[in-house]
Amino acid sequence: MKKTLLFGLTTLALLANNEELYKNCAGCHGEHGEIAALGQSKIITGQDINLTIKQLTAYKDGELNKYGLGNIMQLQLSTLNKEEIEILATYIKNMKKMKNLPPEESLTQ
């Protein structure tokens, strides 16, 4: 019983941390990663973990300026360490695509 409770509490703490890390992203990418950021980027929900880590690391290091969003992304990622980027990438990969989303055009307007 104690192991189950400890596992449950640990899982809840990790989920809370993941959601907290993603909060800064939600303003541009949407609560579930369903929005093209500033009408420019691709929808990130379910994106491959390794690709996300590579992109986030490159944005953080100032080596990527995809869609002209490099400065914004670098600022958003400036306080994250490697482990947090990996956690964030896993969270993005595991986000479920929302059902009944409006057409993409209306999401980016």
Image (spheres, rainbow, N blue to C red):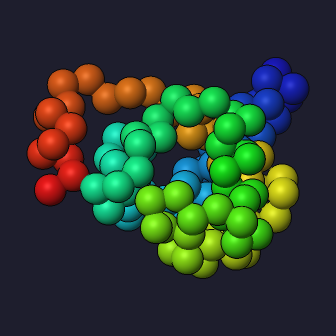
- Name the quadrant containing residue 74: bottom right
- Image point 73% across, 46% down: which residue? 53
- Image point 77% across, 40% down: which residue? 10
Image location (x, y in percent) of residue 7: 79, 31
- Image point 20% across, 47% down: which residue? 107
Q: Is 109 placed above or below 54 here?
A: below
Instruction: Work out whether residue 84 can be spotted.
Output: yes
- Image point 46% across, 35% down: which residue? 45
Q: Is 54 placed above or below 71 here?
A: above
Q: Is 17 placed above or below 73 here?
A: above
Image location (x, y in percent) of residue 20: 58, 59
Q: In which quadrant will I find the C terminus? A: bottom left
> Is residue 4 toward the left or the right of residue 72 in the image?
right
The one of 2 and 34 positioned closer to us in this rendering:
34
Instruction: Work out whether residue 23 can be spotted.
Output: no
**Figure label count:** 0
Image location (x, y in percent) of residue 3: 87, 26
Q: In which quadrant will I find the N terminus? A: top right
The one of 88 and 60 positioned closer to us in this rendering:
60
- Name the quadrant containing residue 79: bottom right
> Is residue 46 toward the left or the right of residue 21 in the image?
left
